[in-house]
Image (cartoon, rainbow, N blue to C red):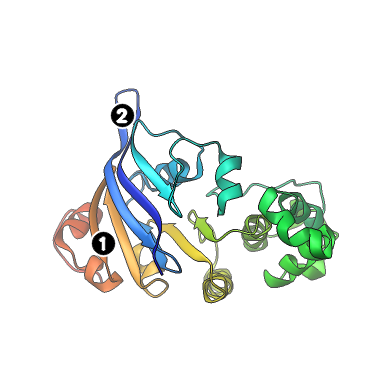
Amino acid sequence: MGIILEVKNLTKKFGGLTAVNDFSFEIQRGEYVGLIGPNGAGKTTVFNLISGFEKPSSGKIRFDGIDITGLKPYKIVNLGIARTFQLVRSFKFLSLLDNIVIPCLSKRGKKVSKKVGAEAYASSILASVGLVDRARIPPVILPHGDLRKLQIGKALGTNPQFLLLDEPFSGLSHEEQEVLTELINKLHDDGVTIFITGHVLRELMTLVPRVIAMHQGKFIADGPPQEVANNKIVLEAYLGRGEGFA
């Protein structure tokens, strides 16, 4: 399959604070990988660096063989990386359909939307995330679980091959998490490489076959979820002691 994302010695400093410290990993095309760590570990900063919302202090990021270190977000999107955010962001007074149409007009989105029309492409995306029956309403009246699905739909509008999902289960009920899990699993089955963050290890243990763990900006473990869950360094980072997860 080949490496789709390569991160080498990535470091990000904010004044005297080092948020990401000499962080390295690789993701193969088609993988489904979780990034875990306690709150404040640096997970979102890693996503911000990959997606161009922050520029690294040092280190390199290569995507599909191209050096994307420090590129603007729109250039990174046009190469095939899309993301969601911890805080739900939408054009809250536009319809759900129009929220999806906008990313469909991106350079990569147009490769698909120009063949069938932007609205038809956007409608198909709304159908894939389970929101097509609400296409004409504004997101301002949606429940939180549906807003999470809309976020993913907006990312899909850019026709990505690599999807960054930052804490997608945050604030969701158990039932909403199950619905979103089914959606994310289907995206992966359809061929999208997925990199997903979570600070609760149990949320990801049954979702992804591989987990990368970080703490205080540093890499601490990489492997199958159960192996990472019982890693002494990971346990100390989460619990302050060497007791295993239930």
The residue drawn where x is 50% and y is 44% is 51
Q: Label 1 near label 2: C-beta < 8 Å?
A: no
The reply, left or right, for residue 22 in relation to residue 129 is left
The residue drawn where x is 30% and y is 45% is 8
Mark earlier in primary sequence (2, 1): 2
- For badge 1, the amino acid type reads Asp
- Judge the density around disc 2: few (<14), some (14-19), many (≥20) Cα neighbours within 10 Å: few
On the image, the x and y values in percent for residue 58 come to: 32, 33
On the image, the x and y values in percent for residue 159 come to: 64, 59
Helix, strand or loop status at disc 1: strand
Helix, strand or loop status at disc 2: strand
On the image, the x and y values in percent for residue 79 come to: 56, 50
- For badge 2, the amino acid type reads Leu
CA gap between label 2 and label 1 equals: 25 Å
- Judge the density around disc 1: few (<14), some (14-19), many (≥20) Cα neighbours within 10 Å: some
- In the rendered image, the quadrant that contains the N terminus is bottom left
> Would residue 83 be visible to someone looking at this image?
no
Q: Residue furthest front?
A: 65
Instruction: Tell me the residue that label 1 is attached to.
Output: 222
The reply, left or right, for residue 137 in relation to residue 179 is right
Asked whether 21 or 141 is in front, the reply is 21
The residue drawn where x is 43% and y is 46% is 44
Instruction: Tell me the residue that label 2 is attached to.
Output: 17
- In the rendered image, the quadrant that contains the C terminus is bottom left
The residue drawn where x is 40% and y is 71% is 208
Asked whether 116 or 147 is in front, the reply is 116
